[in-house]
Amino acid sequence: MNDELPIEPGDVCIDLTSGRALHVMEKAADRADEWSRENNYELAENYGNARVGAAEDDTVWTCVYANSIQSEPSKDYAFPESRLRRVETERANGGERVQDEVRFEFAVQLLDAAEKEVGGDVHTDVHKALRSVDRDLGERVVEFVEASRNGTRDSDQ
């Protein structure tokens, strides 16, 4: 497991108390005590969470269990971060997280659509917007689009 990369929506994690795979949907709260106050339930004191040393300052994630193919997820659950271990799915994707690749592809499509719709060069404005959200993503997208314009577009970037 890779503890260097933080958990984020889209990750696959293992529930340390059950050993079952989970899909992380969203951040539910920055802290377990905050989540507990909002939901009138002591999350860190839950038996399974206490067994793994959940703390009041744990980030809380909304997750769904990845059940069998015959069983669709029907409920989401709040998990303190200390109960989760992220699976390094990026090892099978050239080191890139799947959700990072989705963001990149979406950003390229957004930039292409904006240029077609506006009919001019809007890439500077879109680049600024992308950089304000994710600096590395903005740089990577602009580099990719410029390579495309120069006829050197490589779909594996």
Image (cartoon, rainbow, N blue to C red):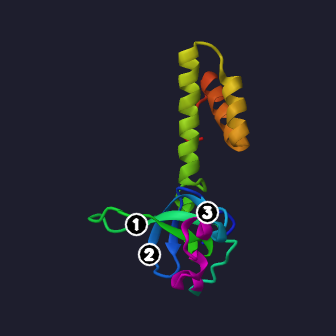
According to the image, label 3 marks what residue?
7
Vertical placement of residue 29 versus 85, above or below: above
Disc 2: CA contacts within 10 A as few (<14), some (14-19) or many (>=20): few
Q: Does residue 49 appear anywhere in the picture?
A: yes
Q: How many labels does the image show?
A: 3
Disc 3: CA contacts within 10 A as few (<14), some (14-19) or many (>=20): many
Marks 3 and 1 sit apart, C-alpha to C-alpha, by: 17 Å
Is residue 130 or residue 73 the one in the foreground? 73
According to the image, label 1 marks what residue?
66
Q: Is residue 24 magenta?
A: no
- For this view, does 143 lie left or right of residue 104? right
Marks 1 and 2 sit apart, C-alpha to C-alpha, by: 8 Å
Is residue 2 or residue 16 the one in the foreground? 16
Q: What stretch is highlighted in magenta?
A: 35-50
- For this view, does 19 lie left or right of residue 59? left
- Residue ranking furthest to the top: 119
Position of the N terminus by quadrant: bottom right
Q: Position of residue 59 (x, y in %)?
A: 64, 66
Q: Does the magenta stretch include residue 36?
A: yes
Judged from the image, the secondary structure of the residue bearing numbered disc 1 is loop
Whichever of callouts 3 and 1 sits on the residue coming sooner in the sequence is 3
Tell me if label 3 and label 1 are in contact, CB under 8 Å: no
Disc 1: CA contacts within 10 A as few (<14), some (14-19) or many (>=20): some
- Residue type at numbered disc 1: Ala
Is residue 95 or residue 83 the one in the foreground? 83
- Residue type at numbered disc 2: Arg
According to the image, label 2 marks what residue?
20
Q: Which residue is drawn at 63% across and 83% down?
A: 53
Is residue 30 or residue 52 the one in the foreground? 30
Q: Position of residue 52 (x, y in %)?
A: 59, 83
The overriding secondary structure of the stretch rendered in magenta is: helix
